[in-house]
Amino acid sequence: MGISPVALLAKRQEWVLVRQMLYGMVAYYGLTLLLFLWSPTFCMVYWVFCHLEGMILLCAISYLWHAFVEESEPDNQYVNSVTILDGHDNTFNEDYHVVHHHSPSTHWTDAPAHFEAHKD
C-alpha cells in the first residue's frame, strides 16, 4: 500500500515525488492508527474496509480497461485499452480511455477532440 510506488520513484530518483508519497503514507497510516486506538470497530468498518473495497473496485476497472491484448501488436495503444464510442455512460470522458495512454497530459475535457484528431 504505497511501498512499490515509492520504490519505483526512488529508483528513478524522483525525490520530490518520493517525499510527497511518504508524507501521504505517514498521514494515512497515522490517521488509521489514531482511528484504531479510538475505536477498532469503527476503524475497521468505516475506514479500512472502505479503503480495501475502493481498491478492489479500481483494480477491477483497471483490469477491464486493459484486459485485451492483441498478440500481433502488443505495443498498440489503440488495441490494448478499451475505447467505447458513443457509450451510454461517459463519465469524465472515460470512454476515450486510449487518450490517457497516447497523451497522458491531455485534460479529460479535451479527450474527444484529441481522439478525433489522432484516430487514424
Image: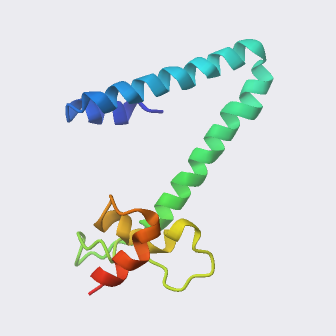
Q: Nearer the viewer, residue 81 or 92?
A: 92
Residue 115, percent across and down?
Answer: 36, 78
Residue at the (35%, 84%) spot, across then down? 116
Q: Is residue 115 left or right of residue 86?
A: left
Which residue appears farthest toward the top when viewing the image? 37
Q: Along the line of sight, which residue is nearer the eye, 41 or 117?
A: 117
In the rendered image of this protein, does residue 70 appear above or below residue 56?
Answer: below
In the shown orientation, is residue 25 left or right of residue 72? right
Residue 64 visible in the picture = yes
Residue 71 at x, y = what percent?
27, 75
| Residue 7 in picture, x, y percent from top left | 30, 30
Question: How far across and how far down the image is residue 41, in percent?
Answer: 79, 24
Count the labels in the image.
Answer: 0
Q: What's the residue at 50%, 74% (across, down)? A: 95
Q: In the image, is residue 98 above or below residue 50? A: below
Let me know if residue 82 appears in the view.
no
In the depicted structure, whether residue 10 falls above or below residue 59:
above
**Which quadrant of the rendered structure holds the C terminus?**
bottom left
The residue that appears at 32% across and 32% down in the rendered structure is: 17
The residue at 48%/27% (across/down) is 24
